[in-house]
Structure formats: C-alpha cells, structure tokens
Amino acid sequence: MRLNFTILGCGSSMGVPRTDGFFGNCNPNERKNYRTRCSVALRSNGATTLIDTSPDLRSQLLKNKIKNINRVIYSHAHADQTHGINDLRVFFLKNKKKIPVYADQDTKNYLIKNFKYCFIKTPSYPPILKMHNLKKTNTFNDGFSSLKIRAIKVKHGKIDCSAFVINNKCAYLSDANYIYEKDIKYFKNLKYLVIDCLRYKEHPSHFNLDQSLKIIKVLKPKKSILTNLHSDLDYNELKKKLPKNVTPAYDGMNFYL
Ligand SMILES: [Zn+2]
C-alpha cells in the first residue's frame, strides 16, 4: 500500500501572509505564497498520521479533506508545531478513544505542562490524548500498510528537534540548522528530502538557502523540497534560483512513497 505524504503547511512561524497581512517579498497573486505553519499528513489504507499540530491545523484538515487522525508524532515543542493540539478534540469524540501522540522527553514535558487538560482529567473536560514515548524506530500497522518512522535528533538553535525518516524513503527536517555528523548516514540517498530553508540570510536556528543547498549536495536525494519558508522567499523567484531536482514546497503539495 503506497503512502501519501502531504505538506499541510510549509510556512515559517508567523505564516505568509502574517496575521497583520504582511507578505514581505512574496507576491500575493501567487497562490503558492500563501503558507500556513509547518505540518505533514501521512496517509495510507484509510489511516492518517500527523507530524505536528500547527496553529493552522483546523484549516489544513478542512482544506485537505482529512476526516480522521489515527496518531500524531511531534518533532519539537515550539508553538508553531504544537499549538493546534486542541483541534484534535473532534477525533476523540468521533473515535470514542484517546488519540495516541508520540513525543520526546522535552516535548512531552512542554505539552503536559501547557496543555494539561488534553492529557489529564479536569472537572470540565475528559482527556483526549494519550502520550507515548517517541522511540528511535517507531512502527505502526494500519491493516495492510505498515509505517516505519525513524526519529533522529538534529540541532535547531538552542534545542534539538526530531527529524524523521519515513519508510526509508523520505526524510523530513522542518526545523534544523545542523545535522550531527554521526547521523548523516540516515539521510543519504533517499527518494525525497524535505528540508528547512527559512530565508536567504543566515539564522541561528534554521538552515538558510545556501546551507540547505550544500546539505542537499552531500545527502544526494533524488528530489529535495524546501520548507519552513519565510516571507523573504517568493515561490517563483526562489524556484528560478534552484537546481532542477530542488523545489520550494507549497501548502497541499503531495507525493507518494
Ligand atoms: Zn522550531
């Protein structure tokens, strides 16, 4: 059973346009410049796995007609990856069971501290989520299809973020500014590499365009997709600067693994 990988959102932390309407260098007439915050849906055999719950989760699920969520994998604790968590409530009500979520220790601590009511019974709400440890290798069976997600820590400024290699075919590094030397081997020669590329200028916790292109040369994927795009990066202007097998992401972009 083939796995569909959908980029639900490819924007930087404030999205494009920002809440105040600011588009930066992005042309408002290009639909691909409308970017919600980063998250991904992996769909196979009627089951959907989410990577992160962005603050735009509700609109992302509506736009992509995703009607159920089987589990969520978290990459890290930042607000743009987690603050849509409350929108998982509907799936608890539909399925009449808690939605399993998987996170590393720091992300677990953050989520349980800041969204306690989602995990622990309160007088007003029943808990809707069940927390699990994110392991190095996570395997999920959904009927005829099996999903294997390897979690690898990458540096993201002052914290580590989990990058994911999915079914040994596609790597997803939405927030990173360094791949630890010992882990480079996990990201080499894949079919797809979806990688952080915040802007043209350097940044302390994200790859910029030059750095992303350098890493792509080392990792040699068949195709690379740039994500976590800030308003400095206009889709068409950026595309013109890229080698043939590298493309900017856009919301709703999807492919099969
Ligand atoms: Zn982040």
Image (cartoon, rainbow, N blue to C red):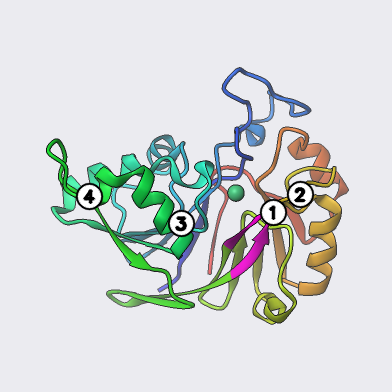
Disc 4 + disc 1, Cβ < 8 Å: no
* Mark 1 → mark 2, Cα distance in angstroms: 6 Å
* In the foreground, 129 or 10: 129
Disc 2 + disc 4, Cβ < 8 Å: no
Which amino acid, mark 4?
Answer: Ile
What label sits on residue 128 in the rendered view?
Answer: 4
Circle 3 sits on which residue? 107
Which residue is pictured at 38% across the width and 43% down the height?
Answer: 114
* In the foreground, 153 or 43: 153
The number of discs equals: 4
Circle 2 sits on which residue? 204
- Residue behind label 1 places its C-beta within 8 angstroms of ligand 1: yes
Disc 1 + disc 2, Cβ < 8 Å: yes
* Mark 3 → mark 2, Cα distance in angstroms: 20 Å
* Mark 3 → mark 1, Cα distance in angstroms: 15 Å
Q: Main secondary structure of the magenta part?
A: strand
* In the foreground, 1 or 233: 233
Density class for disc 1 (Cα within 10 Å; few <14, some 14-19, many ≥20) is some
